[in-house]
Image (cartoon, helix red, strand yellow):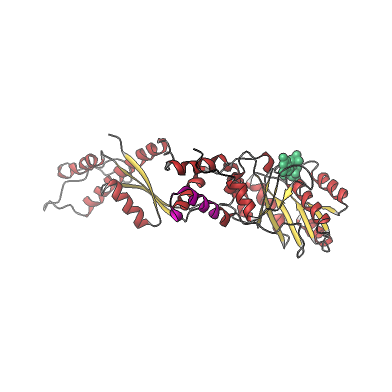
Amino acid sequence: MSAMVKTFRARDARSALAAVKAALGPDAVILSTQEVSGGLFRKAEIEVTAALDPAAPARQRVARAPLSTPKPAPVRHGAARYAVPPPPAPDDAPGPSLIAEELIALRGAVENVRSQLKQQALAAPAEDVRFPAPVMELFEHLIARGLDEGLAEDLLRLAAGAHGTQPALMWRAVRELLAERLIPSRAPWMPGPRRAIALIGPTGVGKTTTLAKIAARALMESRLKVALITVDTYRIGAAEQVARYGSMMNVPTRVAHTEKELARALEFSRTADLVLIDTAGRSKPDDIARQAQLLRSAPGVDLYLCLSAATGAREVAAAAARYAPLKPSRLIFTKLDEADGPASLVSALGPVGRPIVCVTDGQRVPEDIHALTANELVGLVAGDLQLGRG
Ligand SMILES: Nc1nc2c(ncn2[C@@H]2O[C@H](COP(=O)(O)OP(=O)(O)OP(=O)(O)O)[C@@H](O)[C@H]2O)c(=O)[nH]1
Ligand SMILES: [Mg+2]
């Protein structure tokens, strides 16, 4: 008979262990416990993996049997084997060394069972998500919008917890929960106090194009005084790309290779209302960290993270996680026009839960950039759901 391995999550260790006991009984073996981050729609929880191994009682008997065997034998400290303990003490009660040996033997046995069961657990297929049929319709709709499956499941469970599983009420709860997390922020081209903003993000997501769109809108709509700086001295032609936009819009453009040059470029731009800094798209953590150090050397520069919504939820989450250590203050989602499922953008909010300043949906400068309201952001993610169409 194969062992039963189950993972339990609860809000604290006591509840998790109670769940283990209720499901597997008092003979369950705890394989691991860890705190798991709750993600976007959950609080942190305790995760306990436990197993019930039908062979375990027999193995324990094997470990105990030699207690009554008269022959002494060496103990293998720390080895994942059953050690043979020395003969029992005259009064037949195990002495301290016997207990220690027994413990070592048991520890070895548990280690054996643990590693076997862990392998089984890894090989086991993931459980399918199961919801009642009307809720399944909501789930499938969210997945079709591009929302990560795990997040969709969490979101629906949270919505059901708040309002029950009546689909119309659940859908309203889903939209409310999304609205709490999709926070819009003032567009960078709107008038306001002087700002210096660096657009950071993976290669090719549209940082330079977005920078040009923001600059053009700031000039045309808000009549702001704009200055451009580029620290992208990595890609051939990158500085020229920014310089070309600068000359088309008639705004000063500077290139900075070092912390000193960046400080000087910012000093030259001190009379501008809006300073936009273009950066190189990098993917390796070391390169990202080096660029971060350069940007951090300049006080008062806000980092806006640009992520392409045209990549899937996993890629969005991974890119956001790579840039999270830089602590970006705002998010920009690009390439919505190419996004099969725009709800993939929600996956950025776990690693970088910051307000969204704008989205872009095309190559045209400056037309294809938009500051969305909270309602529009929810609409973009949740889409239009006609309930009960089957
Ligand atoms: N479809 C679409 N294309 C876009 C959008 N924004 C930028 N692009 C295109 O994406 C390509 C890359 O844009 P860039 O602005 O150079 O991207 P980047 O992030 O600066 O690239 P690196 O500096 O090389 O990291 C160009 O062809 C842009 O025209 C958008 O919203 N939608
Ligand atoms: Mg660029």
**Residue at image x 85%, y 50%?**
246
Residue range corresponding to the magenta coloring: 161-177
- Quadrant assignment, res 190: bottom right
Left or right: where 250 falls relative to 378? right
Q: Is residue 69 above or below residue 246?
A: above
Return the residue nearer the eye: 352 or 387. 387
Is 193 magenta? The answer is no
Q: Is residue 166 magenta?
A: yes
In the displayed orientation, state which residue is furthest to the bottom: 193
Residue 179 sits in quarter:
bottom right
Compared to 34, does 62 lie above or below?
above
**Residue at 77% of width from left, 64% of height from top?**
194
Residue 382 place in picture, x, y as percent:
58, 47
Residue nearest the observer in this picture, 92 or 223: 223
Name the quadrant of the N terminus.
Answer: top left
In the rendered view, does 159 fall on the left or right side of 291?
A: left
Residue 234 visible in the current orientation? no
